[in-house]
Amino acid sequence: MKRVLLGAIAAVLAVQSASAQELRVGVQNMNNYLDPGSDHSNAGSQYYYNSFDTLIDRDHGGSGDFVPGLATEWEIVSPQMIEFTLREGVRFHDGSEMTAEDVVFSLNRMFSPTYPPYLVRKRDRLDNFTRAEATEDGKVRVYTARPEPIFETLLSMQQTMIVPKGYLMGLTGHPEVDEVGDYEAFGLAPVGTGPYRIAEFVPGERIVYERFDDFWGEPAPYERVVATRIPETVSRVTALRSGEVDMITNLAPDQLDLVDGDPNLKTAGSVTPLFHVMIMNVNHPELEDPRIRRALSLAIDRDLLNESLWKGMAEVPSTHTMEEFGELYMPELETFRYDPEEARRLLEEAGYDGATITYDTHSAYYTNGLLAAQAIMEMWDAVGVNGEINVTESWTTCVPEMMTRNWSNPMYFADPFGSFGVMWGPGGPSESCDRFNTDEAYQETWERFRFSETVEERRAAYAELMEFIEQDPPVLPLYRPYEAWGMQADIDWEPLPSHIPYVLDFRAGRITPAAN
Amino acid sequence: MLSFLSMRLVKLVVTLFVVITLVFFATRLSGNAIDFIAGEGLDAQSRSELIAYYGLREDILTQYWRYLRGIVEGEFGLSFTERRPVTQVFWERVGPTLQLIGGAILLTLVVAVPAGIFAAVRRRDASAQGVMTLAFLGYATPNFVLATLLLLVFSYWLQILPSAGNGTWAHYLMPVTALSLTYIAALIRYTRNATLDVLGQDYLRTARAKGLSEREVVIRHVLRNTLITVLSVFGLMVTALVSSGAVVIESIFSWRGIGDLLVRAAIRRDYPVLQFGVLAVAVAVVTINTLIDIAYAWVDPRVRLGARLT
């Protein structure tokens, strides 16, 4: 009897894992909606690239350079205008043909939004863009308020992916008006032009992609890709080992052995283009003196954190920079360092009186966040700072009482503007929450960094901004965490450096399916 | 019986009102939902606009009043994160959770009641003592520990049972077992004690004296009288299962049920989902309790009479 039962169960499993044309992915997080325009979450970023295109793409499998996407050509006609020649014969997953009207609609919904969630993205990254319009010969022009040095970077971002105007406006209410309800409905039934159409989306649970036969580019390597949420790490690893899934996401360094120990499995990983940071409230009475904050920063031995919490696999930066920034990568700057002697000296000079400095952390939001907090308290103690961890489930980033806490600065797009800039620009989330101040000098430098036309000028200005940050620090990037994916040994896939964090790129050439 | 029922009904309404109020205010104590929905990097102006968009700008009493009015009109609002009616979001999850809980209830009854009676009737045998030792162990093992162990043994090492989701019958074996264990263990002990009480009663001597076999004594007299006690304990167990039992198990086995939904809604501060979910669970719990009270009154006349006297 027992043998019959086991046989039956094994048969059930075998049927489930037999399909050769299917990739099954066990993911830690699944979004509750899918809208490339409003979303910038780590969970959501995983999914858009398979189903949506931008006008300009990147050669993610190769050099990472800009390559034609939905536009076959583009020309920066003036510093404030770029003109696109659209690809012909592109179809959306609903069967409609992409026109200049769709492109203009998609861009303008972000440039002058009526839907509140888009406003956030407009402000933090698309603020310079004023409008898109179609020319009589079917081209699309995009205008900016000020000279734009990074047109290509910004118009290859997830938030500028192209969506079908007619389909979207027809979702609710009046078919020729874009109401808030249309945008909300689109997030549950998204349609794009990419190599996979989203055949099924169960919020918070599952995405089923199917190969889109009318895709304009190289066909998708899989007939079907199913991404299912498996929140617990041990369950994800188990599902991979038992063959229920072919690939899993979100493995931390101390979990790699679970997968690598099995000869049928392997891992691929990289340091994520995202910083875990410590922020310091420059306007808190106890922290107003920059010397105190410099001391808090200098007291932290980030290499030791890396060794003990990340097995040395994370990356500790000398300044707020990432290799992904290309010509604007500036590792030669030394904005942040470990110098406990200097920390002690500064504390004495500032007359630090032993006041309690609180460090807020969520219990589990950031991998190793609480452990890092505990280690930091020890390091502060070593230089005479009386630190105290405050474990809180709330985001205290806009609370005046917040003194220090953990946070992250992701790379939303490959430019210092897309990481440091989004968080620490004038009027951005840090300054508008009154825990960071910019003066005229900072603002003038910021303008030069953001809008100067040459790379040299932008680099020089960025170095100056880092000088401000060093002298009067509101932030310390701790490290770029290491993140890995597990998969069956016969699948070849790896995270590509030209993508933003966590993208699951299953396009042609980016994954080699198993031979079966 | 009628006054007994109407008392229960009043209690039910009051309980639900308290639950609704507590949930409404408690969800809002732990920070603003916007910070969780929008994530990092929200400037002050956008934050304020999103607060308005999600209907959180008005003062909390106005929101509360609007919420109560909505309930009366059957409007429970849209999920913050999914932007569709919370009723829809919730009902999708009811089926899987009911299947899980139903399986656990069934397994608990089928295993625990016979095992408990057996342990009482054969209380001096080594086999009965073995049952009690197992029950003791089972009671002391938290269900998430057992769940993880099962997962490791049957999915990770032996690879004969699926670890995630609820696609086939094989998917039910581990979660149902893990969920039932504590309840089986507890119910075995209750059943055994209740049976021991019954076994000492005079009417059993009478039953034996009139010539019934031991088997008939157990089935006709012991079982029936034991059930009165078992029923009340069992009611408490069902309530515990419905209100909190499946949360961890659903997470470990990636089971898309209510527990999983409510945990995620709590983490993301999806107030409307949380409010409706807790309300629905409260309605279920209160209804089950009422039904069990009624069943109890029906089985045991002393309860009915007691109610009439008050």
Image (cartoon, helix red, strand yellow):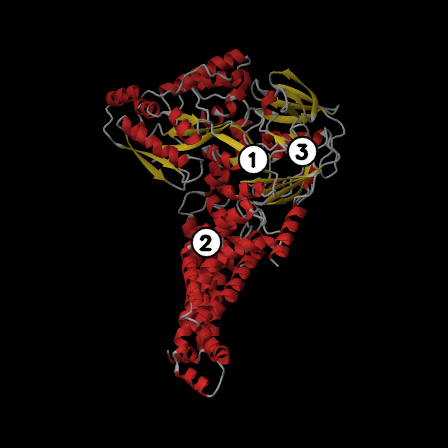
Q: Amino acid at mark 3?
A: Pro
In the figure, B59 relative to A40: above or below?
Answer: below
For the residue pair B128 and B66, the one nearer the viewer reads as B128
Mark-to-mark CA distance, 3 and 1: 14 Å
For the residue pair B250 and A387, the one nearer the viewer reads as B250
Chain at numbered mark 2: B
Position in image of residue A44 (x %, y %): 56, 37
Q: Is residue A162 left or right of residue A117?
A: right
Mark-to-mark CA distance, 1 and 2: 28 Å
Chain at numbered mark 3: A
Residue located 52% across and 11% down the image: A456
Q: Amino acid at mark 2?
A: Asn
Position in image of residue B280 (x %, y %): 50, 58
Q: Which residue is mark 2?
A: B143
Position in image of residue B5 (x %, y %): 46, 74
For the residue pair A493 and B11, the one nearer the viewer reads as A493
| Number of numbered discs on residues | 3
Q: Which secondary structure lies at badge 2?
A: helix
Residue located 55% across and 50% down the image: B255
**Circle number at residue A389:** none
Could you tell which of marks 3 and 1 lies nearer the N-terminus? 1
Q: Which secondary structure lies at badge 3?
A: loop
Chain at numbered mark 1: A
Mark-to-mark CA distance, 3 and 2: 38 Å
Picture quadrant of residue B196: bottom left
**Circle number at residue A486:** 1
For the residue pair A110 and B7, the one nearer the viewer reads as B7
Q: Which residue is mark 3?
A: A513
In the figure, A190 relative to A270: above or below?
Answer: below
